[in-house]
């Protein structure tokens, strides 16, 4: 298990080990083209397919995307139904390709509200790809950062761990991504500049990158621009520039 960035300074690499993405802008992409929102979501799946491939080619080991938040149930019922259908079709059609390319697939979040069919497909996909090592691709579905912390606390209580034994390292072990390093780079498309209840605990020291590009338009060049921005960041983790031996603005 990896230590959190507040407990130990992670190794600095030019290529981020773990990238987290909020894929925003599908609906606006469709609206600009006078298309139904679902057309934007379908185009977004194509964009995600390309980003997964690009991450593997660039040596990124972990990719976590926010596909459906716990707040997205508030959307119109017909859109939620279409999103669930799109999720199911993606599970049916994409997992074999991920497996062929050595990609491990997993879903994080509260799966209880999903249909039996979707839950079965998720379990089958996770089992099929469990031993793949090129890239860990995590999909946050019916996920919220506050929910993640809350479910970790509930597990601590259920395990009978006394309050005096609870510290940051103990709590971290029960979070959804406990077995992965914290994200080095967070990307949000679509122009909004907030993290929207995504990986609240894990993003504490992550470099944030916001772009106006709508998700269906996010391609290899856009990913490279985000990585280039990351490479210019000075990651101090509480230290001074002098301590890390780098000029301000670059390590």
Image: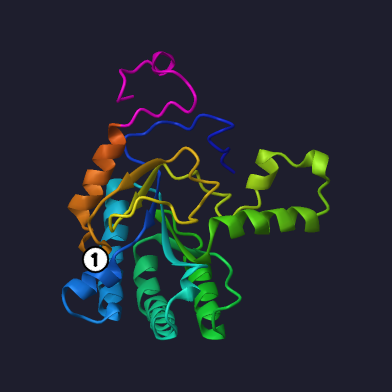
Above or below for 215 versus 63: below
Verify whether residue 248 appears in magenta: yes
Residue plotted at (50% across, 78% down)? 121
In which quadrant of the rendered image does the C terminus lie? top left
Mark 1 neighbour density, 10 Å: few (under 14) some (14–19) many (20 or more): many
Q: Which residue is mark 1?
A: 216
Q: Say left or right for 222 vs 97.
A: left
Q: Say left or right for 215 vs 151.
A: left
Q: Main secondary structure of the magenta part?
A: loop
Residue plotted at (30% across, 17% down)? 247
Name the residue furthest top: 242
Q: Position of residue 65 (x, y in %)?
A: 41, 59
Q: Say left or right for 151 vs 108.
A: right
- Circle 1 SS class: helix
Residue plotted at (66% across, 40% down)? 169
98, 35: nearer the viewer:
35
Q: Position of residue 201 (x, y in %)?
A: 55, 46
Q: Say left or right for 34 vs 159.
A: left
Residue plotted at (70% across, 43% down)? 170
Instruction: Tell me how many marks there are.
Output: 1
Q: Position of residue 138 (x, y in %)?
A: 46, 60
Q: Which residues are magenta?
A: 233-251
* Quadrant housing residue 192: bottom left
Verify whether residue 93 appears in magenta: no
227, 198: nearer the viewer:
198
In which quadrant of the rendered image does the N terminus lie? top right
Above or below for 107 versus 87: above
Q: Position of residue 72 (x, y in %)?
A: 46, 71
């Amino acid at each position: 298990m990896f230590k959190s960035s507040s407990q130990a300074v992670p190794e600095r690499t030019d290529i981020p080990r773990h990238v987290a993405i909020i894929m925003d802008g599908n609906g606006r992409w469709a609206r600009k083209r006078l298309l139904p929102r679902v057309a934007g979501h379908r185009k977004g799946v194509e964009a995600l397919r390309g980003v997964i491939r690009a991450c593997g080619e660039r040596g990124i080991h972990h990719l976590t995307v926010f596909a459906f938040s716990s707040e997205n149930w508030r959307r119109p019922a017909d859109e939620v139904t279409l999103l669930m259908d799109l999720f199911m079709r993606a599970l049916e059609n994409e997992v074999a390709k991920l497996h062929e390319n050595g990609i491990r697939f997993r879903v994080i979040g509260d799966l209880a509200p999903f249909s039996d069919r979707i839950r079965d497909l998720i379990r089958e996909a996770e089992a099929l790809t469990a031993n793949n090592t090129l890239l860990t691709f995590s999909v946050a579905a019916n996920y919220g950062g506050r929910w993640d912390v809350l479910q970790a606390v509930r597990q601590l209580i259920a395990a009978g761990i006394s309050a005096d034994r609870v510290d940051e390292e103990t709590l971290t072990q029960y979070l959804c991504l406990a077995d992965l390093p914290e994200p080095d780079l967070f990307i949000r498309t679509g122009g909004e500049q907030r993290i929207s209840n995504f990986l609240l605990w894990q993003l504490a020291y992550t470099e944030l990158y916001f772009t106006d590009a709508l998700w269906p338009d996010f391609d290899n060049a856009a990913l490279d621009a985000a990585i280039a921005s990351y490479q210019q960041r000075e990651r101090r983790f509480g230290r001074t520039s002098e301590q890390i031996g780098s000029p301000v603005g670059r390590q």
